[in-house]
C-alpha cells in the first residue's frame, strides 16, 4: 500500500475564497479519498491586491515547500503577485523542497520559472484550486488531482511524448521575466504559451519580446495554447493569434509546431516541465 | 544665417490622421517659419493596426533617416508597431542617419532604444505630431518644434543638468525590450519612466521586470514620470505608483530620485538621451 499523498496549497498571488477551498476539498474526498489536502491559512489573507503581504506569502510557500511531510505544492490561484515573493522565497528552499511536485499556471509561472532555473524538477503547468469556479471547473480540478495522485497519461497535454522536453507558460507572465534571474534555460524545450484577456497588439508585442531574446531562440519550437477573451482591438488587428505567432517564429527562426491544449479554461491539460517522468 | 531646418516625419507604429498633420504644419509655419516639415506619405497608410505594412513602415523610416538633406526624424505618433520594424530598419541605416536628431516617445521608444544601443546619439524623448489633438496639445507640439529648432533649455525636463546622462521611456515599451537586442546599455544613466492606461498591478509587474534585470541595475537611478489614466484595480491595489517604484528601487538597490516631468500629456518635457549637448 502506498502512503497517502499530502498536498499543501499556498497562494503566492491573489487570495482564494474559502468557499472555493471547500468545493475542492469535497471533490478531492469523493475522487481521491487517500489524498490529503491542506489549505494553508495564508490563502485567505488579504492585503490590497494580494493574499497577504509579501512576507506572509513567501513564508507560507517556504513553509510547505520545505516540509518533507508534503509531497506537492499546489498553487491556489493566479491573479498577480508571485514575482514579488520569488526572490526571497527561492533563496530559502531546502533539500525537501527539491523532491516535491509543484503545480500551477498563469501568474504562478513566475515561481515555476524560477524553480526550474534553480534546477528543480517535478514542476508542472496545470489547473489550480480556483479553477473550480469555471464552467466545468470540476473537470479541471479533477485533472490536477489525478495528475498529482497518479500521473495519469490522460491528464497530459496530448502532444507530450516520452522523448523531448516541454515547458508551458502564460505569455505575459513569461514575457515579464525575460532577462531576470527567474528566466530558465529552455534550450531544446518545446515552449507552450497561452494567454487570456490581452489585446491582440499586446500578444504581438509579447511575442516580439520573447522571440527576440537570444536564449529563448534556443527552444526546439513554440506551440500556441488558447488565447481567450481577447478584447476588441481598435483598429482591428487584422491578424489572428496563429498568424501573429507564425510571424514571430518565422522572424526569429523558431519552429512553429502548432497548437497546444492549454489555456485559461477547464480543458487546460497538464504540461510537466522538462522530460516526462514515468509515474 | 543658418540653413533652414528640415524635419522628416514617419509613422513606424500607428497611422496619423491627415488633419493632425495639417494642424502641425500650420503651427510650425506660425512659430518656426524657417523650419520645413515633410510628412512622409507612409504616415497615412493603413494596414490593420498599423500605418502600412511592416515593410512600408521600415522603408519610410530608412528613407528619411538615410537622407542627408533631413536634419531630424520626428516620429508621428505612438500606438503600437515600432518593434516590428526595428530589426530590419536598424540594419539599413547609413552614416547620414547617425548625424540626425530623432524625437518621439511611447511606442517609438522601441526604435529610440535600438538606435541608442547601436551608438546613435541625438535621440530625445518628447512630444510627437499626434499630440496636437490633446488638450493644450499645441503647447506640446510647439515644445517639440522649439527643441528641434533651437534646443531651448526651457523645453527640457527640469532635473536635467549639464552633467550626467539621462534617458526616458514608456514603462511598458521599455519592459518589452528587456533582454532583446534593442535594450541599450544604460550604465550610469538616470532612467525616467512614464506610463498611461495600465493597471497598477501591471505597473508593479513591469517595474519588477525592469529592476530585476542585471544590466538595468547599473543605472544611476530612476525618476518616475506621470502614470495617467490608471484603470481601477480589482481589488484595490492599495499602493500608489510612487510606493510601487520605491518598493522595486529598494528591492533592487537602484536609487529612487523622485518624479520626472514627462508623461502622456501636454506637459511632457524633452529628455535628450545621454549627456546634454550644448546647442
Image (tube, coloured by chain):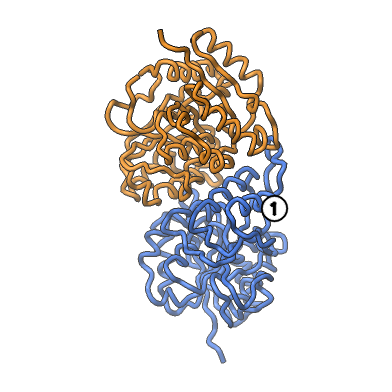
Chain colours: A orange, B blue
Residue at the disc numbered 1: B242
Q: What chain does badge 1 belong to? A: B
Residue B219 vertical placement versus A245 (above, below): below
Residue depicted at x 58% and y 82%: B278
- Residue B205 found in image quarter: top right
Residue depicted at x 68% and y 64%: B261
Q: Position of residue B192 (x, y in %)?
A: 61, 62
Q: Quadrant of the N terminus of chain A?
A: top left
- Residues packed near mark 1 inside 10 Å, few (<14), some (14 to 19) or many (20 plus): some
Between residues A60 and A194, which one lies in front from this camera angle? Answer: A60
- Residue B143 found in image quarter: bottom right
Residue B121 vertical placement versus A12 (above, below): below
Q: Quadrant of the C terminus of chain A?
A: top left
Q: Seen from this angle, which residue lies furthest bottom? A: B1
**From this viewpoint, is residue A247 visible?**
yes
Between residues A159 and A24, which one lies in front from this camera angle? Answer: A24
Amino acid at each position: 500500500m502506498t502512503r497517502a499523498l499530502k498536498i499543501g496549497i499556498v497562494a503566492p498571488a491573489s487570495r482564494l475564497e474559502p468557499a472555493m477551498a471547500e468545493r475542492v476539498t469535497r471533490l478531492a474526498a469523493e475522487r481521491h479519498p487517500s489524498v490529503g489536502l491542506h489549505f494553508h491559512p495564508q490563502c485567505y489573507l488579504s492585503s490590497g491586491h494580494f493574499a497577504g503581504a509579501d512576507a506572509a506569502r513567501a513564508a507560507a510557500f517556504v513553509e510547505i515547500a520545505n516540509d518533507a511531510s508534503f509531497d506537492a505544492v499546489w498553487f491556489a490561484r493566479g491573479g498577480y503577485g508571485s514575482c514579488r515573493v520569488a526572490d526571497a522565497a527561492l533563496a530559502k528552499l531546502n533539500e525537501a523542497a527539491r523532491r516535491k511536485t509543484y503545480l500551477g499556471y498563469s501568474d504562478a509561472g513566475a515561481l515555476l520559472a524560477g524553480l526550474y532555473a534553480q534546477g528543480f524538477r517535478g514542476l508542472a503547468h496545470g489547473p489550480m484550486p480556483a479553477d473550480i469556479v469555471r464552467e466545468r471547473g470540476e473537470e479541471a480540478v479533477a485533472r490536477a488531482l489525478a495528475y498529482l495522485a497518479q500521473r495519469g497519461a490522460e491528464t497530459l497535454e496530448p502532444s507530450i511524448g516520452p522523448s523531448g522536453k516541454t515547458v508551458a507558460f502564460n505569455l505575459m507572465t513569461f514575457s515579464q521575466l525575460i532577462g531576470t534571474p527567474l528566466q530558465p534555460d529552455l534550450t531544446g524545450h518545446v515552449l507552450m504559451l497561452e494567454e487570456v484577456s490581452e489585446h491582440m497588439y499586446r500578444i504581438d508585442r509579447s511575442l516580439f519580446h520573447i522571440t527576440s531574446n537570444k536564449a529563448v531562440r534556443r527552444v526546439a519550437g513554440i506551440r500556441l495554447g488558447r488565447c481567450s477573451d481577447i478584447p476588441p482591438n481598435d483598429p482591428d488587428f487584422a491578424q489572428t493569434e496563429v498568424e501573429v505567432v507564425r510571424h514571430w517564429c518565422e522572424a526569429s527562426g523558431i519552429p512553429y509546431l502548432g497548437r497546444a491544449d492549454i489555456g485559461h479554461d477547464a480543458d487546460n491539460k497538464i504540461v510537466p516541465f522538462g522530460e516526462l517522468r514515468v509515474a
